[in-house]
Image: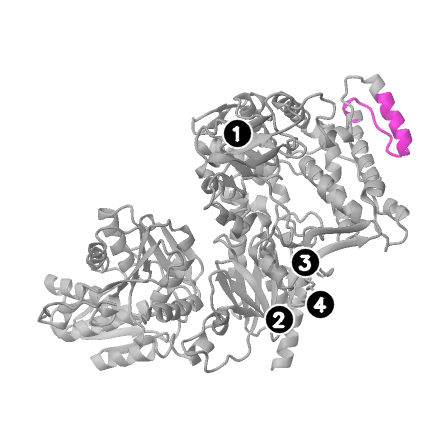
């Protein structure tokens, strides 16, 4: 390492003249991405040890110049430490007295420094109900100003010379970096430093993005005030300087993360910093995935760490004041002491299922009157806690839900009640957009809006958690879980040291959709013509060039999302309504899209108003008991269950078809007699469309050829039938599956079907029922029809073609069933399916690691009809994983997506279907109470 020194030391006439020109140091070990440059502005090199040396000097100098302040006067200020020391040093030089109002969070070293400089310390001991300790300090300042002669309030919270100071601070950064900076991270407090930097940037370098780093428990960017143990950033009252229009984004960091950041910077870069600087390190890690490669980032690190030796760098203080710190970081040299009682839980995956698990856990903790400290670690791959990937709030508005607003409701269906009052979605939406509930219930929302609802509920639940519940956010992916001495060790993707893994006593595992698998996402860097997972659509599909040719595998909801992203998302737009809707291209769309799937059929759309239908008559508990009097025997789906399902479809279809013609189908008839009535009905009303379950399965069974024209015709007929809404016999028929599905789930789960029929159902009938019952809103199918009209679709190869990579980065698609020109070359291939989990070949890194290490095993349905591996993990009926040796992992519970193949139809928003979150919450609290009784 080459170290250069100044050729000549500059002589200063006062210690205050050494303020500024602080070093800018490149950080080589902090960035996770080697293609991002990161620099630290070390304000601890100012003579008073922090950035506040600049602020205090400038405020006092300007006051002296204006005549507001003269030698012998008394300066009064509220400060958590750094501003106070900066003022103490400057006041001593200027011949001024100083009174500093502090609170109990002031550390011992800062207090000793102030006394050494000759400052008078006034301590407030009780926070205000609104405003916290800062509010109490400011009230004390105003009281002292009234009773102190010749007093002056430096007012770092409102004095305009505070932000003006940092024009120079920011200028120094740009001069050192030759004017090139993409991101600047600045901690908040008064927001003087933040806004001074922001104003300089706006005036001189408007393309630089400024990221504000705030504290959890601060009110600067909204939210409820909360207790903070580490001073230096955040505030309990609003800032007089803050203008959010100048800020690109803000990131909140809790006390634990501050400590982690401080120790990481010390260990990796040998730089000792204070709490707000540690917060910046962790904020950078949270934001790093959004930073473009090749970017330059700078951190404004406000102070050094020497004043925190008795707090952040003191093991005893950390263990006493920062819950979870023992598992979250390891001091240099290791822990010398261990914590007292601590019980930790985790939820991995904070989409809706993880949100339900958190809500049930907090409700159970309150119901059981748990008063001991409990730590809950929440892991999510992105920042959309509560919403997850499916409902992330940055999605475009044209990505719609596939069921109506009235079906969305986060509220628990069982006791105990939630710890906070939650609203159903329709009521929340009504209050959010100012439209009556009655006008919203049967409408379809965007997934983005539902994500906002979920995020809002998540924040309400977190805010309502009692003080003994400590919650930690981990914006990262867990890639492995090990068990040692009864604790589960969670290893995140970027953690190299095992001792840094968070350790928990119990966890709920809800993550794991194969579509989010990291290794597939990484493959896009190798071959941009392959898109294995389309979300988030606007970012993932941007690489597809205008006027390209594109193959899309799958014709479900994801196909519609991908198609709309490539058209409406590229600046095209739709005009008109329903059948008259037209698409106006922008020219940025692909030239042609070749959709394909096994069936070649599009989904049946949904409407808000469904027909009134009779209750189930054939697929009932009584009928099922007649088939299987021995509850231990398995059902054969094809031979025993499918005939009953068909009967329900026919019964519902003709109940409404009869009614539409002024007739009534006799629901008490035996099925054979019912068929005779139906036959007579068609003789009398020959124009009425006959129902065929087989044609519903294979829409093109009666067509000699399959091509774009036939698919378009099929879509038009489908839309015509669905558009009848409450009078649609087709909708009446397919509604049967919605009522059958919960009953079927009980028969299907944990190998309730014979192995052979289980496999048959998963491979052939499950996709069919999804296609007919869980389609998009009708509005989106009108859009697809409009795209047909402009010729963007070609379904020539729509049924089970072969596709392979060829030279020049192209794709070749062919189909032997196409008589002429049965081969075509394409530019891009999109996989628009959401594949089921298939351990270990098609799953996340976490499940692959767990499987390969024998911590989980694949579920097998085995009987005399054969053996079938569904791809899901083997689970007990309480959703505990079973390892390779057959041992049950009782302190881990699986919920949602990872149970697919063992249970059926894990709807992301359902609270009642396969509700393992309630089971987990009860068991976790029971284990917690046992732990308490044996520990204390």
Q: Position of residue 435 (x, y in %)?
A: 53, 38
Q: Position of residue 194 (x, y in %)?
A: 29, 57
Magenta segment includes 671: yes
Q: Quadrant of the C terminus?
A: bottom right
**Mark with earlier residue (3, 1):** 1
Neighbourhood count class around disc 1 (C-alpha, 10 Å): few under 14, some 14–19, many 20 upward: some
Number of the front mark, 3 or 2: 3
Between residues 892 and 269, which one lies in front from this camera angle? 269
Q: Position of residue 747 (x, y in %)?
A: 79, 50
- Residue 102 appears left or right of 826: left
Q: Which residue is mark 3?
A: 916
Q: Which residue is mark 4?
A: 887
Between residues 676 and 143, which one lies in front from this camera angle? 676
Q: CA distance from mark 1 to mark 4?
A: 51 Å
What residue is at 30 percent from the left and 71 percent from the top?
140
Number of the front mark, 1 or 4: 1
Is residue 507 visible in the rendered image? The answer is yes
**Mark with earlier residue (3, 4):** 4
Q: CA distance from mark 3 to mark 2?
A: 22 Å
Q: Which mark is residue 825?
A: 1
**Mark with earlier residue (2, 1):** 2
Number of the front mark, 2 or 1: 1
Q: CA distance from mark 2 to mark 1?
A: 66 Å
What span is in magenta? 659-681
Label 3 close to label 2 by CB (< 8 Å): no
**Mark with earlier residue (1, 4):** 1
What residue is at 47 percent from the left and 42 percent from the top?
527
């Amino acid at each position: 390492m080459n170290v250069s020194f100044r050729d000549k030391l500059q002589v200063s006439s006062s210690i205050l003249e050494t303020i500024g020109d602080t070093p800018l140091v490149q950080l080589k070990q902090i960035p996770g991405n080697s293609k991002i440059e990161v620099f630290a502005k070390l304000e601890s090199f100012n003579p008073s040890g922090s950035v506040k040396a600049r602020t205090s000097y400038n405020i006092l100098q300007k006051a002296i110049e204006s005549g507001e302040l003269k030698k012998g006067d008394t300066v009064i200020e509220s400060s958590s430490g750094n501003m106070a020391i900066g003022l103490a040093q400057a006041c001593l030089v200027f011949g001024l007295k100083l009174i500093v109002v502090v609170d109990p969070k002031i550390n011992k070293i800062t207090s000793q420094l102030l006394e050494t400089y000759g400052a008078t310390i006034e301590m407030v001991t009780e926070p205000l109900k609104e405003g916290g300790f800062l509010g109490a300090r400011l009230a004390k300042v105003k009281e002292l100003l009234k009773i102190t002669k010749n007093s002056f309030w430096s007012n770092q919270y409102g004095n305009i010379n505070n932000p003006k100071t940092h024009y120079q601070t920011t200028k120094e950064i740009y001069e050192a970096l030759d004017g090139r900076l993409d991101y600047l991270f600045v901690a908040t407090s008064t927001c003087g430093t933040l806004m001074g930097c922001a104003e300089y940037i706006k005036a001189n370098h408007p393309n630089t993005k400024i990221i504000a780093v705030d504290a959890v428990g601060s009110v600067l960017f909204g939210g409820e005030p909360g207790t903070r143990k580490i001073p230096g950033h955040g505030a309990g009252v609003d800032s007089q300087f803050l203008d959010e229009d100048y800020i690109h984004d803000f990131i909140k960091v809790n006390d634990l993360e501050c400590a982690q950041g401080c120790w990481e910077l010390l260990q990796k870069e040998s730089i000792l910093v204070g709490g707000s600087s540690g917060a910046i390190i962790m904020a950078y890690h949270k934001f790093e995935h959004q930073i473009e490669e090749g970017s330059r980032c700078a951190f404004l690190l406000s102070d050094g760490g020497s004043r925190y030796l008795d707090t952040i760098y003191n093991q005893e203080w950390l263990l006493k004041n920062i819950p979870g710190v023992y598992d979250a970081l390891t001091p240099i040299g290791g822990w010398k002491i261990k914590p007292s009682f601590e019980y930790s839980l985790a939820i991995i995956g904070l989409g809706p299922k993880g949100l339900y698990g958190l809500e049930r856990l907090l409700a159970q903790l309150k119901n059981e009157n748990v008063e001991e400290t409990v730590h809950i670690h929440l892991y999510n791959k992105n920042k959309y806690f509560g919403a997850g990937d499916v409902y992330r709030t940055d999605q475009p508005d044209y990505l719609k839900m596939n069921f109506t607003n009235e079906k969305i409701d986060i509220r628990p269906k069982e006791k105990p009640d939630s710890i906070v009052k939650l609203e159903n979605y329709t009521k929340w939406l009504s209050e959010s957009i100012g439209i009556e509930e009655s006008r919203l219930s049967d409408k379809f929302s965007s997934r983005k809006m539902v994500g906002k609802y979920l995020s809002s509920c998540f924040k309400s639940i977190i805010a309502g958690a009692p003080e003994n519940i400590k919650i930690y956010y981990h914006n990262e992916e867990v890639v492995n879980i090990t068990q040692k001495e009864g604790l589960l060790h969670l290893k995140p993707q970027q953690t190299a040291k095992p001792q840094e893994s968070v350790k928990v006593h119990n966890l709920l595992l809800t993550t794991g959709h194969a579509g989010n698998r990291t290794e597939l996402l990484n493959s896009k860097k190798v071959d941009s013509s392959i898109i294995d997972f389309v979300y988030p659509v606007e970012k993932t599909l941007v690489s597809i060039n205008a006027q390209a040719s594109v193959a899309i595998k799958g014709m479900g909801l994801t196909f519609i999302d991908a198609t709309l992203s490539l058209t409406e998302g590229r600046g095209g737009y739709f005009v008109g309504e329903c059948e008259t809707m037209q698409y106006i291209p922008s020219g940025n769309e692909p030239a042609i899209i070749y959709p394909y799937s096994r069936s070649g059929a599009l989904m049946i759309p949904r409407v808000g108003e469904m027909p009134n239908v009779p209750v189930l008559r054939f697929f009932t508990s009584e009928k099922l008991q007649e088939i299987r009097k021995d509850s231990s025997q398995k059902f054969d789906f094809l031979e025993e269950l499918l005939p009953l399902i068909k009967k329900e479809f026919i019964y519902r279809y003709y109940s409404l078809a009869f009614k539409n013609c002024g007739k009534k189908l006799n629901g008490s008839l035996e099925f054979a007699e019912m068929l005779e009535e139906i036959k007579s009905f068609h003789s009398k009303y020959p124009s009425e469309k006959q129902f065929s379950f087989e044609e519903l399965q294979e829409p093109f069974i009666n067509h000699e050829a399959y091509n774009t024209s036939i698919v378009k015709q099929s879509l038009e007929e489908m839309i015509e039938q669905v558009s009848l809404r409450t009078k649609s016999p087709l909708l009446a028929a397919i509604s049967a599956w919605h009522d059958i599905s919960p009953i079927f789930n009980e028969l299907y789960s944990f190998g309730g079907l014979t192995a052979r029929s289980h496999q048959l159902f998963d491979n052939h009938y499950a996709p069919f029922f999804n296609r007919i019952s869980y389609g998009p809103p009708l509005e989106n199918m009108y859009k697809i029809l409009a795209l047909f009209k402009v010729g963007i679709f070609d379904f020539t190869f729509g049924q089970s073609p072969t596709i392979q990579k060829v030279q020049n980065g192209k794709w070749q698609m062919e189909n032997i069933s196409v008589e002429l020109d049965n081969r075509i070359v394409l530019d891009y291939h999109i996989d628009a399916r959401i594949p089921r989990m298939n351990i270990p070949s098609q799953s996340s890194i976490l499940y692959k690691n767990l499987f390969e290490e024998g911590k989980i095993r694949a579920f097998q349905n085995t009987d005399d009809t054969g053996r079938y591996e569904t791809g899901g993990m083997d689970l007990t009926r309480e959703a505990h994983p079973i390892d390779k040796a057959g041992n049950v992992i009782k302190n881990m519970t699986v919920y949602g997506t990872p149970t697919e193949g063992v249970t059926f139809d894990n709807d992301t928003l359902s609270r009642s279907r396969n509700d393992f979150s309630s089971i987990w919450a009860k068991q976790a609290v029971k284990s917690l109470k046992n732990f308490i009784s044996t520990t204390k």
